[in-house]
Amino acid sequence: MTKRTRIFVGILLAYVVGVSLLMYRQLEEIDPRYRESAEESLVETAQLLATLVEGVSRDGTLQPDALGPVFQALYAKRFKADIYGFEKTRVELRLTVVDRGGQVVFDSTNRALGADHSQWRDVKRALRGEYGARTSPDVDNDPGTSVMYVAVPIRVADQIIGAVSVGKPVQSFGQFVQAARRKTLLVGTISVVAVLLLVVIVSVWLVRPFGVFADYARYVRAQRSFSLPRLGRRALGAARAAFDEMRDALAGRSYVADYVQTLTHEVKSPLSAIRGAAELLQEPMPDADRARFVANIARETQRIQELVDRMMELTALESRRSLDATAPMALRTLLQELATSAQPAAEARGLHIVLEAGEGEATVEGDAFLLQRALSNLVDNALDFSPPGGTVTLALQRHRHSVDLTVRDQGPGIPDYAEDKVFEKFYSLARPQTRKKSTGLGLPFVKEIAGLHEGRVTLRNADEGGAIATLSLPLNK
């Protein structure tokens, strides 16, 4: 087995092990997440039923008798509810009401009427005025019969006169857990097979760069005259090209996987909103509500379109190793043009854009269109986070070998938890005025443009409040 083969086998094994660990982790997390969702619903149901009992027990004496006919009729009902492909036909919710001593005075299933539940964890805590929850099997040593319970106190005149315990069999949502696990395993298996096929194809391409050295050796033998500088440049160019090709092939696999995963996550929310609105539109409703749901579909569709467009721009930018064409650019002139073009948008929001006076001009070698796009993104961010009547300040500061272009706002600044995340793809903070988030691709776009110009971009909190974005570029030599 050659070294190249061993390398590829090692990469494949590392990938398979990594995916296996990830899949194991995901499968283990599915059941707890469903239980958390079910418990949250049980809490609300318990509070609702406790309030009903409190309403008929105002003299301090528990009066749960009215619940009996309700649950008898409820259990007798048969219906059909299609829940993402699973059909539900009956109610499985359970209810017990205990007095202040923990004795059951009402049981919707009539299994524990008169029993002492004072030592059950959920009831015991509820009678103390605390939140109580437990999971217990109906049949000992049979986890398949487990039931989740949530108990809340019944209060009358600030006195706890009993507790309501609401239960739901775990098997009622177990089918959803099993379906989620099957889907996760299917996606993981398809991912592994697809990547294995991709690596096989890439491995064929990767063999070619190693042949460059053999071609180069033949070229050297064919030369009639010996020129060490020319041979050195050709050898360096061949090695660099081979290295770039291998690097791109190896990195591309995880790059694509990460992009697909993050894009899927971001598109999931607007798609759910569109689906929900579309389902509601199928029902009769007032014209005003119908117009509102149609507008919601249009808004979420536009959000997806913006996300895809920005992602395509960023992907195209990341695929470039260098600028195709550059020209000398006067940065103060660029800032003046940007301030002028952004002034109408600022005035519409009651904001001001100020270009600080500076000494002299600074010229860099770069792409005028890309730098204008980068600065526009920074200005748009500053406008979004500025309060009404605020000022966005543009400035140019020249150093010995570089120049800083700064955009400062008077907004709330960057929270501590977000300082290390603002340049991550799809990460976005809610705008103070609208509470809406952007696509989260603007700052990564600026970062790529800065890298192509051999510069860098930073975003930090200003000492006097607000945030300050700095685009640093090397000066012409």
Image: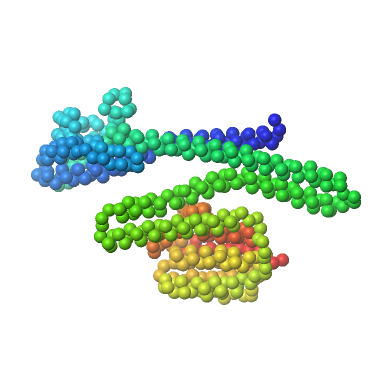
For the C terminus, the quadrant is bottom right
Question: Percent x, y for residue 306?
Answer: 47, 59
Which residue is most to the top?
Answer: 141
Q: Residue at x 65, y 40 (%)?
A: 203
Q: Quadrant of residue 172?
A: top left
Residue 109 image position (x, y, % from top left):
19, 32
Q: Which of the pair 17/91 is nearer the observer? A: 91
Using the image as rendered, state which of residue 460 and residue 264 is in the foreground: 264
Residue nearer the viewer, 157 or 383 = 383
Q: Residue furthest right?
A: 225
The image shows residue 104 at horizontal and vertical percentages of 17, 32
Residue drawn where x is 64% and y is 36% of the image: 8
Position of residue 391 in the picture relative to residue 403 (left or right): left
Residue 123 occupies quadrant:
top left
- Out of 303 and 466, give the one closest to the viewer: 303
Q: How is the image coloured?
A: rainbow
Can residue 455 be seen in the rendering of this structure? Answer: yes
- Is residue 454 visible to us here? no
Image point (53%, 66%), residue name: 376
194 to 339, vertically: above or below: above
Q: Position of residue 82 (x, y in %)?
A: 30, 42
